[in-house]
Amino acid sequence: MPSDGRTRHAERLCALDDIPDGEGKGFTRPGLGDRGDFFVVRRGAAVYGYLNRCPHAELPLDFVPDQFIDRRTGHILCAVHGATFRVADGSCLSGPCPGTALDPVSIELRGRSVFLTDARASGCQLQARSESGGDPMEDRPNRGSS
């Protein structure tokens, strides 16, 4: 979780077990970035949050919903041009974005629940990204495991 003074607001996103270990889950929260899209990656009992936007192409990282991790390397992957980013700090490891990093979103683990604690999100309603057009508060099924 970044210690940049943005940690003021707290809103439950999901249970830790809703994010498979080593994978990510996308959310939409008006007020965060241009579109409000962000994602959370789980590594064991640690969680990391970033805006869902490549610093090079300014496009979403996941071409397939919730597919943020390169299964070969375990790094965050931009599906547009193959750039990879370190999970722990969002730093670009390879691709056309040297010296840049993903924009962090303050996330906190409280017990077995994942919370959005980013002040940029205060005063807006959380929406789990959904392709079905159903209730925006329902978490999407994980499509990342096979």
Image: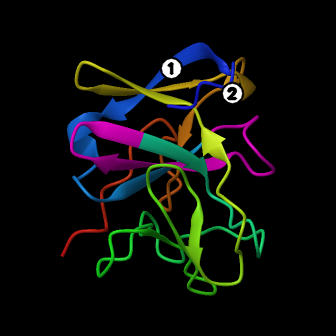
Whether residue 5 sits left or right of residue 143 in the image: it is: right
Which structural element holds mark 1?
A: strand
- Residue at image location 18% in from the left, 76% down from the top: 146
* Image location (x, y in percent) of residue 37: 64, 50
Identify the residue position indicated by label 2 in the image.
121
Q: Are marks 1 and 2 in contact (CB under 8 Å)?
A: yes
Q: Quadrant of residue 54?
A: bottom right
* Image location (x, y in percent) of residue 135: 48, 41
Q: Is residue 68 above or below residue 140?
A: below
Q: Is 70 inside the magenta-drawn segment?
A: no
Q: Which residues are magenta?
A: 29-47
Whether residue 4 sits left or right of residue 78 in the image: it is: right
- Residue at image location 74% in from the left, 27% down from the top: 120
* Image location (x, y in percent) of residue 111: 24, 18
- Mark 1, Cα crowd under 10 Å, few <14 / some 14-19 / many 20+, is some
- Residue at image location 58% in from the left, 48% down from the top: 50
Mark 1 vs mark 2, CA separation in Å: 9 Å
Hey, what amino acid is under mark 1? Glu
Q: Is 39 inside the magenta-drawn segment?
A: yes
Find the residue positioned furthest to the top.
Answer: 8
Hey, what amino acid is under mark 2? Ala
Find the residue positioned furthest to the front.
Answer: 99
- Residue at image location 30% in from the left, 25% down from the top: 113
Comparing 130 with 26, the one in front is 26
Residue 11: image tag: 1
Q: Is residue 68 above or below residue 137?
A: below
Q: Which of the two labelled residues, at mark 1 and mark 2, occupies the earlier sequence position?
A: 1
Whether residue 130 sits left or right of residue 58 in the image: it is: left
